[in-house]
Image (tube, rainbow, N blue to C red):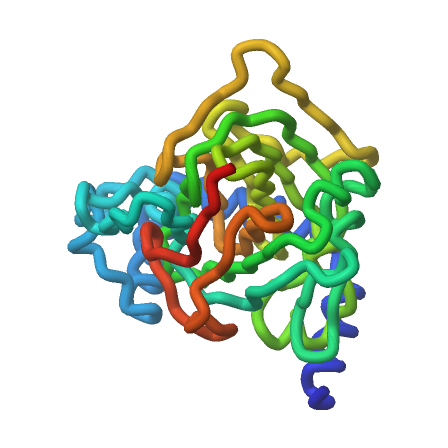
């Protein structure tokens, strides 16, 4: 690990993550036109954001920065893989890591892994569902589309909000900070699908001002001192393939988990690959 990465990780560990993120929320939801127009144009120019894909292509017409950041896309901008058993990418971004959950461990970066049980909130029974299963971690950069969609159709069973730190989730930090995704604040959603159980984990990061789901709205902020759980035994939400399930206000990471013998990722996928919502990531097996 480079010395610069170690220094970066140490400095981040000293920062008041939640305070900085709340201050960022104030700025990103400000309707003061000179500020919000400057911030939006800065991101568009720096990251070469393709505004032609957005339903609203006029940067100055967004009410605030987060309104722009979670912009909707024109129909057809993200073609959905038509293969009948396809598991699709839930987001635009880059594959951070992808593979098998080996003895309850998920690869974070070269030489680093973390516990699936801790990631999911500490319940051994929940972790056992995904023992020897499959995982994919997708990093969303500031230029990416920031709404999250279903990789496969599923019925919601439980949502878990797990408080934690808010380290950056960029490549340099994931290579430097141990157990990063199992330390950061996150929202876990558990589903039943035609191929078996699936989990989607929305991982917070520094300056991510909130995490939302379509059925609940804003889950965080505020944060909490204890794990919070919501179960859906009656009339649970059912979401179709590619249907929106949530969003990040500012960018972060989403992790997808499947159980053993439910599916396989495409063999040509690897860490660092750029992907888009709707692109095929794997093949699901039906019982």
User: Left or right: where does residue 200 sit relative to residue 44?
Assistant: right
- At a point 54% along the width and 67% down the height, the residue shown is 96
Tell me residue 34's x, y (percent). 32, 51
Residue 152, image quadrant: top left
Task: Report whether residue 242 is seen.
Answer: yes
Q: Hey, which residue is sitting farthest top in the picture?
A: 234
Tell me residue 105's x, y (percent). 75, 61
Task: Report whether residue 59 is seen.
Answer: no
Q: Is residue 39 above or below residue 274?
A: above
User: Left or right: where does residue 198 sit relative to residue 237?
Assistant: right
Nearer-the-camera pick, 34 or 178? 178
- At a point 63% along the width and 62% down the height, the residue shown is 100
Quadrant in which the N terminus appears: bottom right
Q: Is residue 106 above or below residue 23?
A: below
Tell me residue 219's x, y (percent). 60, 31
Q: Hey, which residue is sitting farthest front in the picture?
A: 287
- At a point 49% along the width and 55% down the height, the residue shown is 251
Tell me residue 266's x, y (percent). 43, 64
Nearer-the-camera pick, 229 or 239? 239
Residue 136, image quadrant: bottom right
- At a point 47% along the width and 37% down the height, the residue shown is 246
């Amino acid at each position: 690990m480079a010395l610069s990465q170690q220094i970066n990780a140490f400095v981040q560990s000293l920062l008041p993550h939640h305070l900085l993120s709340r201050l960022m929320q104030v700025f990103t939801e400000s309707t003061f036109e000179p500020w919000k127009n400057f911030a939006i144009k800065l991101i568009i120019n720096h990251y070469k954001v393709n505004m032609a894909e957005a339903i609203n292509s006029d940067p100055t017409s967004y009410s605030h920065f987060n309104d722009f950041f979670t912009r909707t896309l024109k129909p057809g901008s993200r073609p959905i893989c038509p293969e009948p058993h396809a598991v699709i990418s839930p987001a635009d971004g880059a594959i951070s890591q992808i593979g098998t959950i080996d003895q309850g461990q998920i690869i974070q970066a070269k030489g680093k892994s973390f516990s699936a049980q801790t990631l999911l909130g500490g319940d051994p029974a929940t972790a056992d569902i995904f023992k020897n299963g499959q995982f994919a971690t997708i990093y969303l950069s500031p230029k990416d589309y920031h709404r999250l969609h279903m990789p496969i159709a599923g019925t919601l069973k439980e949502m878990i909000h797990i408080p934690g730190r808010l380290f950056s989730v960029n490549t340099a930090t994931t290579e430097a900070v141990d157990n990063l995704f199992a330390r950061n604040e996150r929202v876990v959603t558990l589903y039943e699908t035609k191929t078996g159980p699936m989990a989607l984990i929305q991982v917070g990061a520094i300056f991510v001002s909130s995490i939302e789901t379509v059925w609940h709205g804003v889950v965080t902020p505020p944060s909490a001192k204890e794990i919070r759980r919501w179960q859906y035994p009656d009339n649970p939400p059912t979401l179709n393939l590619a249907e929106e399930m949530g969003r990040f206000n500012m960018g972060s990471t989403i992790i997808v988990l499947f159980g053993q013998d439910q599916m396989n990722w495409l063999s040509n996928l690897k860490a660092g690959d750029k992907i888009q919502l709707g692109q095929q990531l794997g093949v699901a097996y039906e019982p």
